[in-house]
Image (cartoon, grey):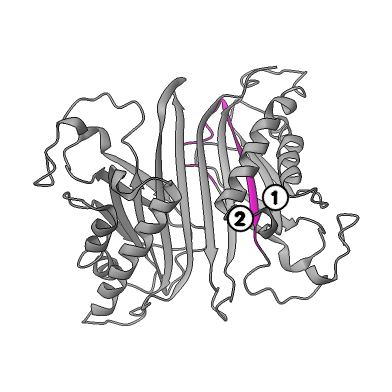
Amino acid sequence: MKAKIRKIATFVEETCTEMGRAVQPPTRRAAAVAVIENPCAGKYVEDLTELMDIGEELGELLTQRAVTALGIPANTVESYGKAAAVGENGELEHAAAILHPKLGTPVRKVLGKGAALIPSSKKRGGLGVVLDIPLGHKDAAFVRSHFDGMEVRMNDAPRANEIMIAIAVTDSGRPLPRVGGLTKDQIKGEDGLR
Amino acid sequence: MPEVRVRKKLTTVEEIFHEGGPIASTPLHRAAVLVVIQNPFAGRYVEDIAGFMDDLKPLGMEMASGLISALGGDARVVKGYGKGAIVGSAGELEHGALWHVPGGYGMRELLGGAKAIVSSSKKVGGPGARLDVPITHINASYVRSHLDAMEVGVTDAPRSDEIVLVLVMTTGPRVHARVGGLKASEMKGEDGLR
């Protein structure tokens, strides 16, 4: 692997009730987060190819980890999202290099499909910084029940010369969705939007 | 006594390869399971609360079993443990103390009668409150290499009338443990201390 990984964490959330009402079946989602050394920390680097290649590796690794943690077949994942936090000696552009050029293809390969844009967020921050990973339906971005977000953080990352990269997957949308819009059983899933 | 009403569950697993030093031949795993329950005593002073400990025992077993599964399913890999609770603002610290017996019971039972006291922390806090859960060796509290802690929390819990219950297990010493003291290989494991 090109990525020098210090640690990997997975988070699995299961919501059973909301405001006293049962969520049946419970909504479940998982995130996998890697903490890696930032090879471009502390200096201006024009060519970010190395980070793009790392993004490709992590796209596969973290999607597999998240799906395994969720414990469902990869092709039944309903929504997804990605995010990165760069330590203080790095640039926001480093997060962009990991997330955008090459990370998505292996994610979609693991999941079997993924016509929609993978929603993303990025930031620079210190240890314990909170990453809000945006979530959207993997085949049709307009599915309103699946607009969501998942918060992850690690108290000891990112250090100044590190980057924290997260991929989240779900088996469902929000618990008890009831604000209308396109529903998952209405989608075509061809253009990634509807 | 009241039934245990679960709103949500969160499982976190960390796999730690290094912390700036040599890469571990066997990565350290740390896992936490957090369950958000309704606090049946919130909002008023209730004198007689102790019976709820028995009600929590099945949940303690379920959480301990879930942790072992998250660490690969073999209880023999578990070398450290800890527990904790975060009580929402309409409850008392004493409600968190209800977790001592059922939390410890479940882990000891499934870890083959672990000898050491299960170290713990608790607090009253709002949604997103973080808790540092102390960790010690399961059979001898003085094993210095295994003294550790894991920071945990749930973004949207505890609400005022909820309690977050936590169990934590680890598979070994701190990744670069080197400050001496009693070694795991030297302990007797009879009195729970050495």
Q: Residue at x 28, y 44 (%)?
A: A79
Rendered location of residue B13, percent (x, y) = 53, 55
Residue wearing tag 1: B82
Q: Amino acid at mark 2?
A: Met
- Segment colored magenta: B153-171
Q: Which mark is residue B150?
A: 2
Per the image, is B47 magenta?
Answer: no
Marks 1 and 2: in contact by CB < 8 Å?
yes
State the image coordinates of residue A69 (x, y, percent, origin top left): 45, 51
Q: Label 1 sits on what residue type? A: Gly
> What is the secondary structure assignment of the residue under circle 2?
strand
Q: Residue at x 82, y 52 (%)?
A: B116
Q: Nearer the viewer, residue A99 or A140?
A: A140
Image quarter of residue B42: top right
Going from the N terminus, do you reach mark 2 or mark 1 first? Answer: 1
Residue B164 magenta: yes
Q: In this rendering, would B146 be left or right of B33?
A: right
